[in-house]
Amino acid sequence: MKCSLLRCAALLAVCAAGASVASLSAPADAAAFTKIGGNLSLSQRDFRVFNNFSDATANNNTATIPNFPGQSGAVLAIWKGHAEWGSEPRGGTGVGDGLASNPVIGSGAANFDNVFGGTHTATGTINDNVHSEQTGSSGSTLAYTQTPISDGWRIRYYSTWTWHDGPGSISGGMDLQGVSTHEIGHTLGLGHTTVGGSTMLAFISGTGGGARSIESDDIGGVQSIYGAKSSTKPHIGDLSGSKTPGGTLTITGSGFTTTGNDVWFTRQGNLGNPEKVLNVSSTGGGTVINVVVPATATDGDVLVKNGSGSSHSNLSNAWPIDIGSAATAGSGFTELHPGLGTATGAVPYLSGGGDLLPGGVFWIEIDSLQPGAPGVLFVSFAQAALPFKGGTLYAYPAAAEFAFVTDTGSQLLLEGSLPAGGMPSGVTLVLQAWFADAAGPQGAVATNGLQLDLP
């Protein structure tokens, strides 16, 4: 349901800049957080962002931050808001805000962590765990959270306000990261507090960036719902090895069980739920996991749920992973993620390898969702990133289009060689395959892109 200002005071949306925080009186030494009832189970830890924010200032931060790979602008600002409630500093360092008052992101110290589910192509339903802008206004309300949370939530930001993505102090508009951090607190099960300086105050200015950093009362609130971080909670301390789909990733940490660990990845296809590799063993007394990166994984998070149960304390912290430009076999091949999958999460896959030198043999493989699938392979001399059919079109403008049908094994393997005389130096080819599929978001699914840089 959507909680209104009059009927559900404990679930008020963040209010306007004109409201004075100083006018509120609250005991500074007593916990005053409130709870709306319920919590997010392990099946509701994902979140997505539909980046339909209309203000240029909501997407003018183009800096790349290793702790939040592959995202910028409004998506990055909101991702930071989720990470602030995490059980420990993001990526071990907490770097990523740029505001002196909040140098470390990840302060919850509770048995709670979200998993980034990628961007979305629509506002979704009230249970889809999606952030988006909403046209219009509602008095002094900046944003609101739709509940109940047990089966999902949705956060809407009114377009009448001018939204800023930071990362520095905000003036002349509303701080998207700070307001999202407040609203995310509601999705965790928190109501409002009367403790001055807290992120969960009912009335915040929405400017200046102060609400980005949760304070002691906010921390006490999230710990009261999910428990203070357990000493047995799985912990990821580092990633090494291959981050390429099909490669072996090594996760180092603690609290993993000998068998039965599930490794979660952010999944391609705007589908929200993480891609899970199930029943993975650990070595080193529960300190090392080796896992093959799934073909459908993309930039975002890695988490480990150990095999000891399904309580809040069985899921690890979220660790950043950059998969977005994974090189495949052979020099000169680069994958461009994500692809576009069906509603059940299946994503077709394009890979390649071999020798791109003159006279060398190379191969291109298309793995479809089903045998005998008709498709089109687009080939371009330029890389694009255009919204198309609910996904991203990488090979545009198309210099050539090749219709094909995958074989009975749901694959198409192409082999070839470059002329002995070579190609003009520095030529780049970008390939992507699209399939008609009724189960796709707009009746289509697509592979990732594949870039070939010819020597």
Image: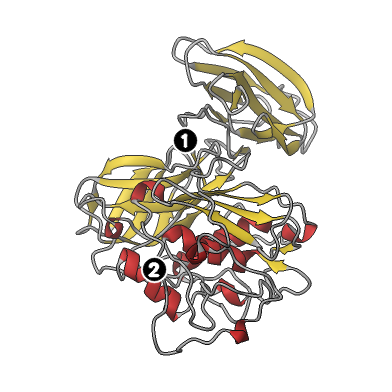
When the figure is inspected, residue 420 is found, relative to residue 259, above or below; the finding is above
Seen from the viewer's position, the closer of residues 159 and 430 is 159
Seen from the viewer's position, the closer of residues 380 and 200 is 200
Question: Position of 22 compared to 244: left or right?
Answer: right
The image quadrant of residue 420 is top right
When the figure is inspected, residue 203 is found, relative to residue 398, above or below; the finding is below
Task: Please tell me which residue is depicted at 45% across the width and 89% down the height of the picture.
Answer: 27
Question: Position of 450 compared to 83: left or right?
Answer: right
- For label 2, the crowd category at 10 Å Cα-Cα, with few meaning under 14, some 14 to 19 and many 20 or more, is many
Question: Position of 66 compared to 59: left or right?
Answer: left
Disc number lying in front (1 or 2): 2
Which amino acid is tagged 2? Val
Distance of label 1 from label 2 (alpha carbons): 35 Å
When the figure is inspected, residue 240 is found, relative to residue 10, above or below; the finding is above
The image quadrant of residue 437 is top right
Q: What residue did someone put label 1 on?
A: 295
Instruction: Please tell me whether mark 1 sits on a helix, a strand or a loop.
Output: loop
Instruction: Please tell me whether mark 2 sits on a helix, a strand or a loop.
Output: helix
Task: Please tell me which residue is depicted at 22% across the width and 51% down the height of the picture.
Answer: 309
Res 222 label: 2
Q: Is residue 139 visible?
A: yes
Seen from the viewer's position, the closer of residues 417 and 250 is 250
Q: Position of residue 297 (x, y in %)?
A: 48, 41
Of label 1 and label 2, which has the lower sequence position? 2
